[in-house]
Image: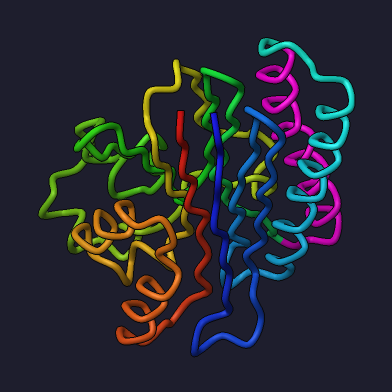
Amino acid sequence: MLIEYVDFTSCGLVRQINQDSIFAATKDEYGLFAVADGMGGHFGGEIASGTLIDMLKKWWQEFISEMYEFDKCYDDLRQIMYDANEKIYNEFSNAGKICGTTIGLLFIFNDRYIVINSGDTRVYAKCGLKITQLSKDHIYGKEAVITGNITKKEVTASPNKNKLTAAIGSKKELKMYIASAPLKANNFLICSDGVYKFCNYLNIITAMLMKDPQQYITKIIEKNGAGDNYSFIKINIEK
């Protein structure tokens, strides 16, 4: 199995600081890919995303040295989210500040994968002709509609419709999504909201079909103003 990837991050055309941090690495039939998007509008978003990515980098070096079993990888990556949440929350809450980062993570282990997300960074998979969002959006509007607490019409009018309900480090209690499954997809895309908010679903599908979608995505986003940081990792798998 051959794993190839293209990764890209930019501060966009409006913001001066890139609060996104990304990591992508492979070894043989293993790969770790993560996009962390520091919470915009809050102090130190780039610190939060950088802290989480640094912890994942450290774990990856340990993994390729020791080659852990799959179950240990699952437990380790899950625990890193809790450890990062505690570290970021304690550091900034003690100073009276809110700081956090979303995360979209994909770990490929031979013929299986693990996906983790907290917040609104997304992980997409392409299996044959079908494209599926593997991650779960932790956004007030979507969650409220799913639980039946609010109608779609009320969501549209709500000023909180796009408010995050989860992020690493923003609250003492961590909310995240984690799952594992057999590896059947041949393409994955991990992206911050700065990508899919400026690229419509057709653009996402087109990008998923490309081996290197960098110029395409950048052209679409910057044409629409690039009002946010935007980052993505495109993963191609050949068996």
| Image-quadrant location for residue 129 | top left
Relative vertical location of residue 165 with respect to residue 160 in this rendering, above or below: above
Residue lying at 56% horizontally and 85% vertically, measured from the top left: 15
Which residue lies at the image location 38% right of the left edge and 71% below the top edge?
Answer: 217
Q: Look at the image and say whether residue 220 sits in the magenta stretch.
A: no
Magenta includes 84? yes
* Quarter-of-image position of residue 70: top right
Q: State the residue in front, 191 or 171.
A: 191
> Would you say 2 lies left or right of 94 here?
left
Q: Does residue 130 appear left or right of residue 137 in this picture?
A: left
Q: Quadrant of the N terminus?
A: top right
Q: Position of residue 108 (x, y in %)?
A: 58, 29
Which residue is pictured at 77% across the width and 63% down the height?
A: 47
Q: Position of residue 139 (x, y in %)?
A: 38, 48
Q: Nearer the viewer, residue 148 or 9?
A: 9
Residue 46 at what x, y percent from top left?
71, 66
Query: Which is nearer the eye, 9 or 235?
Result: 235
Whether 21 is drawn above or below 128: the answer is below
Q: Is residue 48 left or right of residue 194?
A: right
Decide: is 62 above or below 57.
Answer: above
Total tally of numbered discs in the picture: 0
Q: Main secondary structure of the magenta part?
A: helix
Indicate the position of residue 221 as horizontal and vertical percent values.
36, 77
Tell me where the magenta segment starts and ends, as one range: 72-97
